[in-house]
Image (cartoon, grey):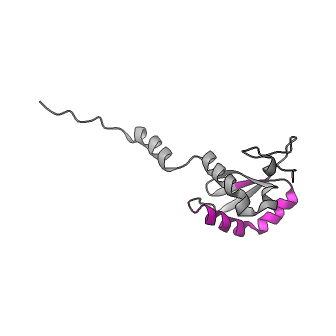
Amino acid sequence: MRKRLPKLLSIKEILPNAMHQTVPDQKSIIWSLDDLWEQIVGAPLARQTRPLSIKEGKLKIGVVHSTLANELIFLQSTLIERIKKEIPSLKVSELRFQIMTSSSGSIGLKTSPERSFGKK
């Protein structure tokens, strides 16, 4: 009797699973970054900023005011260095800032009173 060979899988069948196992999804990356955010930017900035998303090395950060966004542009290289120090596997090459507005006074992925905008 001939031994039956296992069915060969196409790249189309293998690739989605392989990519999912090796590349973390955006939400888990942002959650990890959010957990370390106060360490990276310091408590005063952490109360006024929040990492929102990352795509192609561009990290979008929510800020409470346009003046703060302008100030952070000048700190961009320092912030990128700190991010790389805390999460070396995260490839960030540029920061983008988005002014956040919320009637509840809270923005971001997680809700916690000490990290909500507008609260001290």
Q: Is residue 108 above or below residue 36?
A: above
Relative side of 36 to 10, left or right: right
Q: Is residue 4 above or below residue 62?
A: above
Q: Quadrant of the C terminus?
A: bottom right
37 within the magenta span: no
Whole-percent x, y for residue 27 in the image: 63, 45
- Residue at 39% x, 42% y is 11
Relative depth, front residue between 55 and 37? 37
Q: Residue furthest left?
A: 1
Magenta stretch prevailing secondary structure: helix
Q: Is residue 23 above or below residue 16?
A: below
State the image quarter where residue 5 is shown.
top left
Relative depth, front residue between 73 and 47? 47
State the image quarter where residue 17 is shown.
top left
Relative depth, front residue between 43 and 101? 43
- Residue at 77% x, 56% y is 97
66 within the magenta span: yes
Whole-percent x, y for residue 69 in the image: 82, 60
Relative side of 80 to 16, left or right: right
Whole-percent x, y for residue 4 in the image: 20, 33
- Residue at 52% x, 50% y is 23
State the image quarter where residue 86 is shown.
bottom right
- Residue at 88% x, 41% y is 103
Q: Quadrant of the N terminus?
A: top left
Which residues make up the magenta segment? 60-89
